[in-house]
Image: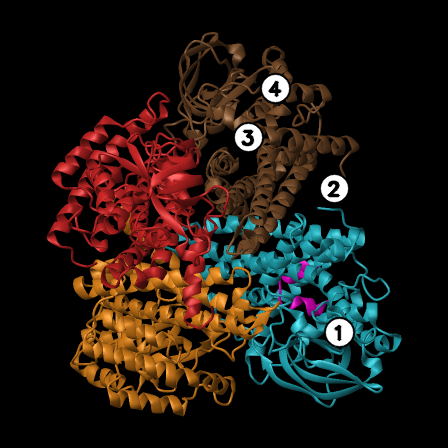
Chain colours: A orange, B red, C brown, D cyan
Amino acid sequence: MFELSLHARQTLKQVTERVQQQIIPLEQPFAQAMANPDRGWQLMPELETLKLDCREKGLWNLFMPVKEYGAGFSNYEYALMAEAMGHSLLAPEVFNCNAPDTGNMEVLVHYGSQLQQEQWLKPLLRGDIRSAFCMTEPEVASSDATNMQATAQIQGNEVVLNGRKWWSTGIGHPNCRMLIFMGLTFPEAPKHQQHSMVLVPRDHPGVKIERLLSVFGSRHLPQGHGEVSFDNVRLPLGAIIAGPGRGFEIAQGRLGPGRIHHAMRAIGAAERLLKMMIERGIHRRAFGKPLIDLGGNRERIANHRMAIDQARLLCLHTARLIDNQGIKAAICEVAQIKVVAANLMQQVADDAIQMHGGAGVDDSLPLAEFWAGGRVLRIADGPDEVHRATIAKLELKKYGHL
Amino acid sequence: MFELSLHARQTLKQVTERVQQQIIPLEQPFAQAMANPDRGWQLMPELETLKLDCREKGLWNLFMPVKEYGAGFSNYEYALMAEAMGHSLLAPEVFNCNAPDTGNMEVLVHYGSQLQQEQWLKPLLRGDIRSAFCMTEPEVASSDATNMQATAQIQGNEVVLNGRKWWSTGIGHPNCRMLIFMGLTFPEAPKHQQHSMVLVPRDHPGVKIERLLSVFGSRHLPQGHGEVSFDNVRLPLGAIIAGPGRGFEIAQGRLGPGRIHHAMRAIGAAERLLKMMIERGIHRRAFGKPLIDLGGNRERIANHRMAIDQARLLCLHTARLIDNQGIKAAICEVAQIKVVAANLMQQVADDAIQMHGGAGVDDSLPLAEFWAGGRVLRIADGPDEVHRATIAKLELKKYGHL
Amino acid sequence: MFELSLHARQTLKQVTERVQQQIIPLEQPFAQAMANPDRGWQLMPELETLKLDCREKGLWNLFMPVKEYGAGFSNYEYALMAEAMGHSLLAPEVFNCNAPDTGNMEVLVHYGSQLQQEQWLKPLLRGDIRSAFCMTEPEVASSDATNMQATAQIQGNEVVLNGRKWWSTGIGHPNCRMLIFMGLTFPEAPKHQQHSMVLVPRDHPGVKIERLLSVFGSRHLPQGHGEVSFDNVRLPLGAIIAGPGRGFEIAQGRLGPGRIHHAMRAIGAAERLLKMMIERGIHRRAFGKPLIDLGGNRERIANHRMAIDQARLLCLHTARLIDNQGIKAAICEVAQIKVVAANLMQQVADDAIQMHGGAGVDDSLPLAEFWAGGRVLRIADGPDEVHRATIAKLELKKYGHL
Amino acid sequence: MFELSLHARQTLKQVTERVQQQIIPLEQPFAQAMANPDRGWQLMPELETLKLDCREKGLWNLFMPVKEYGAGFSNYEYALMAEAMGHSLLAPEVFNCNAPDTGNMEVLVHYGSQLQQEQWLKPLLRGDIRSAFCMTEPEVASSDATNMQATAQIQGNEVVLNGRKWWSTGIGHPNCRMLIFMGLTFPEAPKHQQHSMVLVPRDHPGVKIERLLSVFGSRHLPQGHGEVSFDNVRLPLGAIIAGPGRGFEIAQGRLGPGRIHHAMRAIGAAERLLKMMIERGIHRRAFGKPLIDLGGNRERIANHRMAIDQARLLCLHTARLIDNQGIKAAICEVAQIKVVAANLMQQVADDAIQMHGGAGVDDSLPLAEFWAGGRVLRIADGPDEVHRATIAKLELKKYGHL
């Protein structure tokens, strides 16, 4: 809707072309490779080659708004690129725009010490290593973050980590070298000043990947999600990001733009799914007609078009609001796009699957994986219910009702 | 989202203030007056006074994009004013922005001869008279406009009208003086060149209001909707707008911006309804709590906030598209907003009614009337199904599937 | 599903025939008569004749389970007749099965003194008079009945009524002679022993009909709903039903079977609406096809068939549960049918309206009136939300969660 | 609702107890065993022991209505047992009631020659072998069965099978020894007399399992679904069931009761899922309350309770209809339960997952697997759309609209 700079326009075009012409064709070979138990958890050479080429061509770190470290696009500009990447689940990593590395890099840019940046930010920016983020815990409802039980206690000149985390995304990646851990440091402090974030080398003593979780049967290869135990993990105080007790402050800053990325990728996914749904509906026939012309299928196409277009406009509006007025002005909108985009992606995926019949649930097409991605997005980074509660709270606040 | 001109911003502010401070307080007295069978179908003096004042202050003909005839706002600018007017069902007429007069005036500006403009456009622009639009027919499915059966036959230097129309909105208004009739002239011509639009004085011989229709029990006072018979209504050829056979061409041009108006008013209505829902939910208590804090009520507030914000963005985007690229570039978007806004208005009204309990269905509050307005909007100007079919058709066209 | 007795089977057949052949044909003349402001609030002679005939033939008081006073059918048997009556909004009164008279008669049978029965029950059973029920109040959320503010104070040998009621159904009927009032007698007693029910002649001093309410524009002629003020209405203690403080006990007993009646009528209405929807869809054509064969219309037919069949089974199951195990065993099921049937009726009505286009919202067809009936049923006798809360409460109780 | 025989009541009780006390506790060990790539596709000894015990105790072949071959319960009686088994995905096989063996056994009972019964029915009835069913094809829309392309050509005294099938359920089971293949024999015959069903030993030359399909990432161990190629598979004519050209006739008879089984298992699954949802909602806390008491969660519980109870009644009603009047009288009802039960199971699973957060999507709980089961049931044995079309067709037939 708004004019893009020439650079953004050109980059968007290149990202779109690469996704459509180079990455999507790799989906099926990738799925086959991952289905092979002897090949899982390994990198796919074709994707690695693409990645190197993107890095060389400057199609790299597109998410990073700070020019010194990356592409320097606005949220609005990057949102459109995130949508383009959303068309394939394999795309984000190719442009070094993969969660949770993106959020972790942003944290290091804004809160990392020079040493921390040297050690972790640089290799992440180059894509030489990957990272994980360890916040959610199995034993408590993480929708209420103050429930967190893991600890990051300060003992002398060390910080000592204990507890169990799960949904530690990225930890299964062969190149994962670092994880950010969040735990309780000051139980007596005000609610949002109790926790610290700590940088932990993946192979540090006391860190143990208990198991790798599945998402509706998928291992989300190659990054994976882990359940990780921390047993007296001892690190120097310099491993704490921005100082003890600032965990929540960092977490909040980390989430806003990240939700734009997630939401726009979900919208890109929805476009891809709608496309697959239509193509299947046009080419398969039953009862003498293309499926698309039977029953309420055209109505469903129209409904998805309306939903996608509205979700995109909401998301771009939010991105621009953040660009112009900062994240705090956009709290309601950020909560909205989180709910809207995840549900959209799940819903379009569900109908696309239905149009494919049996072919829709097997892993030879990416439909089931897309569906799972949308479904889990309704839980990850705060479930729908928490975001709806936020939206309602802000609405009622206008009327003085707390 | 986009910058408004100073004039637009100031006008929007004034419209908003008048609606909230002067018009909404008249709703209840108006409802009481209309409920009185001896008072129905008459004008309310307080509203007439407001109207005169708006005309004097230039808060008038805000919908008219052609500066020579009215305010000269863009579709985008007027859309925001239409939303402000949508907060009250009484508001549009106060600013001389009431359908179907608005569409009729646009038709006369774009297609009317000098004589036609002199006779009908001028008094309409001044608000001295009102008008009706006679297209829909009781005997055929009007969703398919080519079904139309009424005729406008050319006999010598006269055009002769025969047939029966209904949902002729505005015909009950005490000041209604003219109606635009659409009928079949050239049955053998290509499908969209068969019909003519004719200007008919309301009291012309052969025009008979058979009855006034109700919309869920409401007569939609004071304008009303009529079932009208035309029995050999004879008019000079000069009464035909733009020449015989151009009816569809005119109808198409008439609808696009009109749908923006309708949709934005529906969004304004939805905001008002959400406000009423919240205020009731905060102030009524049951089981020891404000209703708003019971069950899923807060979720419903959040869902409505998300739906309204998305619908508004879609509508403003469409308005801007029309402003920048013309109505033909926005066919899909116009169909979308028609479906989205009408369903939104109905849905929020339904939940607002539920929150009010018995008070929600009676006519002492405008809730039932708003609901009926939203419900009928899902039928008027093409039912949901036709617009969904259009959206799907345009989507499938991208894939070469016709 | 279960075998009916010969008597029940024959009665059901006769009720069905009368509704279809004699009552439905009167709907349109009735609507026209009621639309005439000089004719409203009067009885329609044709209906009165039918009524007398039904009384003579014993098609009368079919709802009354106690043989001494009426037909003596089980809830299961009467449920099927209620469905048959639900096909027309005019039908119940013809068989003297109209709310709130039915509930009022049941109350008098079970709780009325001999004198009360003589004075009010007999003429009600004969259909000579009608009655109203005054419980809901405008100033409080009636979903929580303990909110009730009206008072029925005992002063010496009189009970004195004060307060304001609304949605007093039946009070507009020309033959209404009596109303049952519920008010607070013992503010200090346990919550469900505070209120009394009192029999009040409609024309008693201090009883004033402030206005007649509308339901989406309909006055629900000829019975109507009133807002009624009670200003020091003094009655002898003998006017109290079953003794002071027993109001809630009576109200509870009154509602269970009444909800079966409402629900089954709603299901009958849904069947009628589906029929109208299909007939319209078959006979109207657009774009070269019957409407029913366009878009998702057949899917909607299938969805309604599934919903209706399930709702009926649930309702019949509930009726039988009450017959076999009493109302207390069926609390959850009664709450379920209330929600299910009302929403079903509203939903089918909405789609039937859509299939009719403009003809669906005007009062020349009963669609809008049916819709309004379904809509208001989601509020009357406890809103959806209260019944959902009951269902959830009973479900969670199984797990010990209160 | 209806009285059960003593035998049925006792059997139902025993099945319920075994499922709850012996089978559900094995779910987690089973999931762990299957997740181990070295253990997949093997049988679990604990389950095999249970199976033997059930066979000894006569809790065996409960689905088989013909007393000579199995338990001899009515559809109504077995429906309740199927619901009890539906609580665990592992249960049906334990009672030798697992699809597709159940359908295959019914086919052999009704259409098998003595030889065929000796060879295949007996070991199936004993549970010594398992079987597969090969009907669906990858290259055509199987929702329209006349699309089928595989061939079963008669050449001399042999029948020769060619083509490719998929979703051949059961073919991955270590004990699978036989599959039923359906293919085109008489291309010129009337539409429903063209195909034959043929009994094929799994290891017969020319039969090749190309790959094992996944269902949202699950391999549905241990039975599995295969894509199977048939390359000039030659069998004696005696392998054809009931003679050439009778495939459709057999397929129709096979499906009716099978859909009752599927539907009732889905309802049992929904009950289990609701239970898991509630238990999680009661025990997890956020923002100071149990999750179940937040937002709209209680409304969701109520909605699921209403949906489950209605679906069960519909299903039992259908079972009884088949028992009393045969499968042909229940075509509409069978289509209904197929749609209703599958959607119900998916919907309750989705909400149960949401209540569990991250724990809901991983395979350590059976939620994701249940979800996948419900989702695939919306496709298997005819997609929702085909069944909705059937229901609508039967409804419109009442009005003479074909």
Instruction: Determine which of the numbered discs, if any, sits on residue D36 in the image.
Output: none
- The secondary structure that most of the magenta stretch takes on is helix
Residue farthest toward the front in the current orientation of the protein: B156
The residue indicated by pointer 4 is C48
Q: Is residue D308 or residue D17 the one in the foreground?
A: D308
- Where's the N terminus of chain B, which quadrant? bottom left
The residue indicated by pointer 3 is C28
Which element carries disc 2, helix, strand or loop?
Answer: loop
What amino acid type should be assigned to the residue bearing mark 1? Answer: Gln
Q: Quadrant of residue D275?
A: bottom right
A208 displayed left or right of D114: left
What amino acid type should be assigned to the residue bearing mark 3? Answer: Gln
Q: Is residue D24 or residue B113 the one in the foreground?
A: B113
Which chain does tag 3 point to?
A: C
The residue indicated by pointer 2 is C2
Q: CA distance from mark 3 to mark 4?
A: 16 Å
D54 displayed left or right of A201: right
Instruction: Determine which of the numbered discs, if any, sits on residue D194 in the image.
Output: 1
If you read the primary sequence from the N terminus, does the residue marked by circle 3 or circle 4 appear first? 3
